[in-house]
Image (cartoon, rainbow, N blue to C red):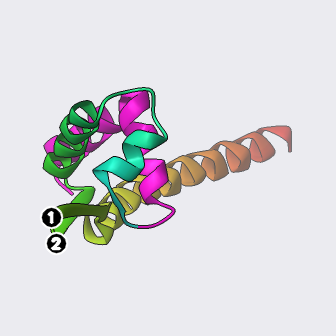
Amino acid sequence: MATYQVGAVLEALGDPTRRSIFEMLGEGPQAVGQLALRLPVSRPAVSQHLKVLKQAGVVIDRARGTQRIYEIDREGLAELRAYLDDIWTNALDAFKHAAESAAEEDK
């Protein structure tokens, strides 16, 4: 995932309402109305938040009759996970190196 895309995803998920919507979509695909019933914001506001999440690449939608059904974009999420896994791996490697260095100093 390119750095600007990661930034867009992290920025999008930095908003508490968008993060709540994203977490609700983790439970399964849902329409705007379903999401709005569980949030203290209007349906148009939910739609705007979904637009930002879609532009960030972590949400997709499809038509079902007159509704738009939103769900997590597994590909976008996989790219974000890979980015976070890289950071975690680097942190673990740095911790291992620091622990080994400390052990050598104690000898």
**Percent position of residue 18, x then y:** 36, 37
Quarter residue 10 falls in: top left
Is residue 18 part of the magenta span, yes or no? yes
Which of the two residues, 47 or 16, is positioned nearer the viewer here? Answer: 47
89 displayed left or right of 62: right
**Percent position of residue 39, x then y:** 45, 34
Q: Amino acid at mark 2?
A: Gly
Main SS of the magenta part reads helix
Point out which mark residue 98 bears.
none
Report if the CB atoms under discs 2 and 1 are less than 8 Å apart: yes
In the displayed structure, 31 sits above or below 5; it is: below
6 displayed left or right of 55: right
Residue matched to label 2: 65
Residue matched to label 1: 66
100 displayed left or right of 46: right
What stretch of residues is rendered in magenta?
Answer: 1-28
Quarter residue 15 falls in: top left
In the displayed structure, 57 sits above or below 53; it is: below
